[in-house]
Amino acid sequence: MNKAFVLLAGTPEQLLPARELMAFTLASHIILVPLGVALPFITLVMHHRALRRNDPVALLLARRWSAVMAVQFAVGIVTGTVLSFEFGLLWPKMMGTWGDVFGLGFGVEAWAFFLEAVLIAVYLYGWRRLPARTHFWLATPLPFAALMGAFGIIGANAWMNTPQGFTLDAQGRPTDVDIRSAVFTPMFGPQYWHFVVAMFLTAGYVVAGVYAVGWLRGRRDRYHRLGFCVPFTVAAILTPVQFFLGDNIAREVYQKQPVKFAAMELVWKSGSHVPEYLFGRLQSDGTVKGGIKIPQLDSILAGGSPGSEVTGLSSVLAADRPTARQATIAHWAFDIMAGIGSALILLAVWYGWCWLRRRDLPRSRWFFRCAAVAGVASVVTVECGWITAEVGRQPWIVYEHMRVSEAVTPTSAGSLWTMFGVVVVVYVLMFGAFLGVVMKMSRRWRLAVPAGEEGHGPEADTPYGPRRERAGAAHGPTTPPESGPGRGDAR
């Protein structure tokens, strides 16, 4: 279900708007996914630091991040629900035929969503209302709920890439479903861990980028230092891990989905000693225009030696492979993802080298400029990863079993274009409101914590949570907060 720019002759006219709508909603939703999956963990790391070291600044950061977590989750519920409906509305034949085989993943994801909502509500409510340790331990299931949601959705997508766990009857319909086999497909493990680590390092770079911008603007207090160091350290540790996971999943695609691998690498003819192209555009005759050609490198990367055989796009019928334009899109997305990932490794090494030598942050403003950009760059890599996975699988919605054109809704193209326009308007308003709320919270917090101050007074109320009466209110003064972070005080 990806963006397609050219419709082949004979394909349904509603295919293009259905793809465009699915691509837009998926690309929008995935912007929120890193924070939804990983921000609970990063927040609890900061919360644990606050309790272990009796650190009021760390507690203040954890408390504020929990407010952002709640706002992000609310928007994510909307975008995730829209995607769930679109599977049934836009691709009814896929869901009708294969839903009994791979639908468990969507069920797991829905339950995880519900559990995460309850846990976030408890976490927000618990500030100032629960003993500190109890409050912290009640929140520890949050990261596991987020990982369970990722388990469900990646399980469904991995099945679409390497479908198994069923037999086909005489009419070509799946029977004798083996749920365990359908969930744990050959691509599930590589996809799941690649995705999860991508979410954690992306969230780390996004959160750290906010404080990097503050650092560049002269806010050099401990609040900004700690707000940068904890999430950036998480991301820096995971970046080289992701490099190896990315290499592993590329090799798995080479073995399990050779035609997709050929699209990712612009390989036209099967053979050995295949060159690697950095960017470039595949032409309809199989030639590659532009780009940088590195002899034999693709065979080495795929199989470990120049003599490794690589399957080409021309090895299958034109109807069973991505078009030249789709292959180019997948290839560019893959190269951008790999390029940004390599740059992030250098940034992580820079950070690690300075920390090991001086136990201090890098002093160069260029480091913080790069760190500020790293969050946006990480989100771009996440988008590129999904483009690579979905465009490279074309024309199959269920790999080698059902084409996208066979699964599309019979709804008229005009109705789908209208729906697409409505969704775009609603999403623009929704994301605008989300950014407005987050920026308003940021401005309020910035005014409450003057730059350069080491001491931070307690916030009177939980952000976007239950309020307590202020001193001088109609019902009388409030009880002074208990001293120390042992009761969740956010000094």
Image (spheres, rainbow, N blue to C red):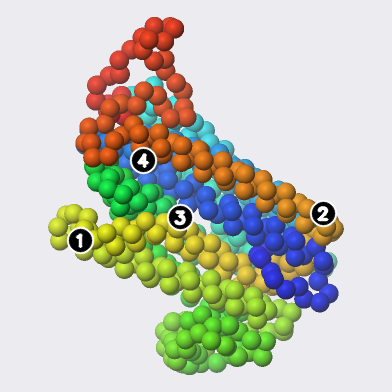
Q: Position of residue 104 (x, y in %)?
A: 63, 51
Could you tell me if the residues under marks 2 and 4 are in contact, i.e. CB atoms within 8 Å? no
Vertical position of residue 259 compared to residue 208: above or below: below
* Residue 347 showing in the rendered view: yes
28 on left or right of 301? right
Q: Which residue is the site of mark 1?
A: 354
Q: Which residue is the site of mark 4?
A: 44
Compute the Cα span from label 2 to label 3: 35 Å
Compute the Cα span from label 1 to label 2: 57 Å
Could you tell me if the residues under marks 4 and 1 are in contact, i.e. CB atoms within 8 Å? no
Q: Which residue is the site of mark 2?
A: 415
Q: Position of residue 80 (x, y in %)?
A: 61, 47
Identify the residue shown where x is 45% and y is 58%: 376
Regarding mark 1 in the picture, which secondary structure is present there? helix
Vertical position of residue 173 compared to residue 72: above or below: below
Circle nearer the N terminus (1, 2): 1
Label disc, if present, on residue 199 of the rendered structure: 3
24 on left or right of 310? right
Compute the Cα span from label 4 to label 1: 26 Å
Specify the amino acid type for callout 4: Leu
Q: Position of residue 81 (x, y in %)?
A: 65, 45
Circle nearer the N terminus (2, 4): 4
Residue 253, quarter of the rendered image: bottom right
Circle nearer the N terminus (2, 3): 3
Compute the Cα span from label 3 to label 1: 25 Å
Regarding mark 2 in the picture, which secondary structure is present there? helix
324 on left or right of 53? right
